[in-house]
Amino acid sequence: MRILITGVTGLIGSHMADFAIAKGHKVWGLRRFRSDNKNIEGIGKLKIINGEITDPTSVEKAVAISKPDIIFHLA
């Protein structure tokens, strides 16, 4: 399954990404430019898309790149 997570650098988003990757899913995370990466540093295979959830172009780009089966909106 292809998963897009908004708010991936937050506590819940980072745990969701780690869990989904461990289950064998392909995971992309939408990350704000100014977000701290400390929660996602150790997550292998996580693909980051830089953007802003309030910017429609960023959201369209994230969806186009990840082609998700499901989106977890945690931003």
Image: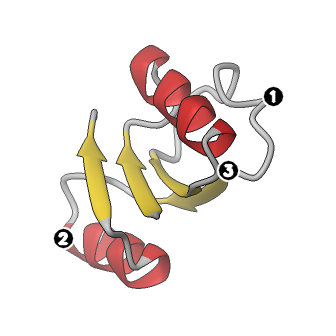
Residue hosting label 3: 46
Location of residue 71 by image quarter: bottom left
Mark 1: give few (<14), some (14-19) or many (20+) Cα within 10 Å: few
SS at badge 2: helix
Query: Residue at left 43%, top 58%?
Result: 3
Q: Is residue 52 left or right of residue 3?
A: left
Name the residue type under label 3. Answer: Leu
Could you say which disc has been placed on residue 56 in the image? 2
Q: Cβ–Cβ below 8 Å for labels 1 and 2?
A: no
The label nearer to you, 2 versus 3, is 3
Q: Position of residue 45 (x, y in %)?
A: 76, 52
Residue hosting label 1: 42
Q: Is residue 56 left or right of residue 49?
A: left
Name the residue type under label 1. Answer: Gly
Camera-side residue: 21 or 47? 21
Decide which of tag 1 and tag 2 comes sooner along the chain.
1
SS at badge 3: loop
Which color scheme does this rendered protein use? secondary structure
Q: Position of residue 14 (x, y in %)?
A: 54, 27
Does residue 61 lie above or below 32 as drawn? Answer: below
Location of residue 27 by image quarter: bottom right
SS at badge 1: loop
Does residue 39 lie above or below 55 as drawn? Answer: above
Does residue 73 lie above or below 9 as drawn? Answer: below
Q: Cβ–Cβ below 8 Å for labels 3 and 1?
A: no
